[in-house]
Image: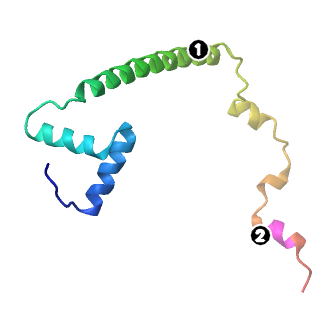
Amino acid sequence: MIQLKIDDRWQDKITKIASDRQTTPEEVMQEAIALYLGEVAANSGDRLVALEQDVIILKSTVDRLRTLVTVMRQQQLNAPSNVISETSAIADIDDDDDIYDEPDEILYDFLEPS
């Protein structure tokens, strides 16, 4: 058995990795040393199976998202357009002279005479 003292930051990282992988810090260290020595860690097969399962789940999710995007695009193309064109919006404006008033003219109407 080898014992060594490591930096607290490293210990925190190793603990986080172990927690994420649902394993122990000792197994994480064994795998790291095995990788460094060019060996295959005993639990690497389990990790490969887990990664393969994650890939299958991700592929399924991507397929569902593609289907959803296709449906949404089709709905958008089939939806009636409620957009008002600029020319019709401008035509609806009254020909009131107030829209051409300068801001200072408008403000003077609200001020008390001095």
Q: Position of residue 83 (x, y in %)?
A: 70, 28
In the depicted structure, whether residue 48 falls above or below residue 67? below
How many discs appear? Answer: 2
Callout 1: helix, strand or loop?
helix
Q: Is residue 75 magenta?
A: no
Q: Position of residue 20 (x, y in %)?
A: 38, 41
Residue lying at 84% horizontally and 44% vertically, measured from the top left: 95
The image quadrant that residue 75 belongs to is top right
Callout 2: helix, strand or loop?
helix
Residue lying at 29% horizontally and 49% vertically, measured from the top left: 14
The image quadrant that residue 53 belongs to is top left
Amino acid type of the residue tagged 1 in the rendering: Val
- The range drawn in magenta is 104-108
In the depicted structure, whether residue 53 falls above or below residue 29? above
Amino acid type of the residue tagged 2 in the rendering: Asp
Judging depth in this view, the residue of 59 and 25 nearest the camera is: 25
Disc 2 marks which residue? 104
Q: Position of residue 15 (x, y in %)?
A: 34, 50
Q: Is residue 106 magenta?
A: yes
Q: Is residue 21 left or right of residue 112?
A: left
Disc 1 marks which residue? 71
Quadrant for the C terminus in the image: bottom right
Q: Position of residue 54 (x, y in %)?
A: 38, 24
Q: Is residue 55 left or right of residue 48?
A: right
